[in-house]
Image (spheres, rainbow, N blue to C red):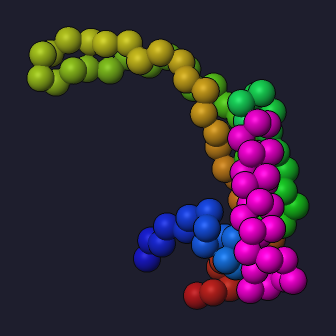
Amino acid sequence: NFKTMRKIEIAEYIVSNTTLSRSQAIAATDCVVEAISKSLINGESLFIRGFATIKAVTSAPKKARNINKGTVVTIPAQNTAKLVLSKELKELMNLKK
């Protein structure tokens, strides 16, 4: 089962589980997303205890075939992120079964 959770849904979860107002929860959610984004843009990795490590990584350039034209193209190196779940979260996910 795949469920997409939007930032507003995270904010609503915060509202229902804290004493923050809706606007405060939205601001807090936006702030967290901004902090994570800025760290990754700066090439820094994040460690969120009990959740995951989000690593800023650079993929190597790759060769690929264009099957329509039969030519080889080079895909340049790209900056991306890798999510590595914490041991605690993995264990909790496996208890769910």
- Corner quadrant of residue 69: top left
**Does residue 34 appear anywhere in the picture?**
yes
Above or below for 4 versus 31: below
Q: Main secondary structure of the magenta part?
A: helix
Based on the displayed image, in which of its 4 quarters is residue 24 positioned? bottom right
Res. 86 in view: no
Q: How many marks?
A: 0
User: Which residue is found at the position 61% from the left and 67% from the top?
Assistant: 8
Residue 73 at x, y percent in the picture: 31, 13
Compared across the picture, whether 62 is left or right of 93 comes to: left
Q: Position of residue 39 (x, y in %)?
A: 79, 36
In the picture provided, is 9 more to the left or to the right than 26?
Answer: left
Q: Would residue 78 appear left or right of 66 to someone viewing this image?
A: right
**Residue stretch in magenta:** 15-39
Q: Quadrant of the C terminus?
A: bottom right
Residue at the image position 84 percent from the left and 50 percent from the top: 47
Residue at image coords 41%, 18%: 75
Residue 68 image position (x, y, % from top left): 12, 23
Q: Is residue 40 rendered magenta in the image?
A: no
Q: Is residue 74 above or below residue 2?
A: above
Quarter of the N terminus within the rendering: bottom left
Between residue 5 and residue 51, name the one nearer to us: 5
Which residue occupies 77% across, 60% down? 27
Q: Is residue 68 above or below residue 74?
A: below
- Residue 85 location (% of width, % of height): 71, 59
Q: Nearer the viewer, residue 12 or 68?
A: 12
Q: Per the image, is 18 magenta?
A: yes
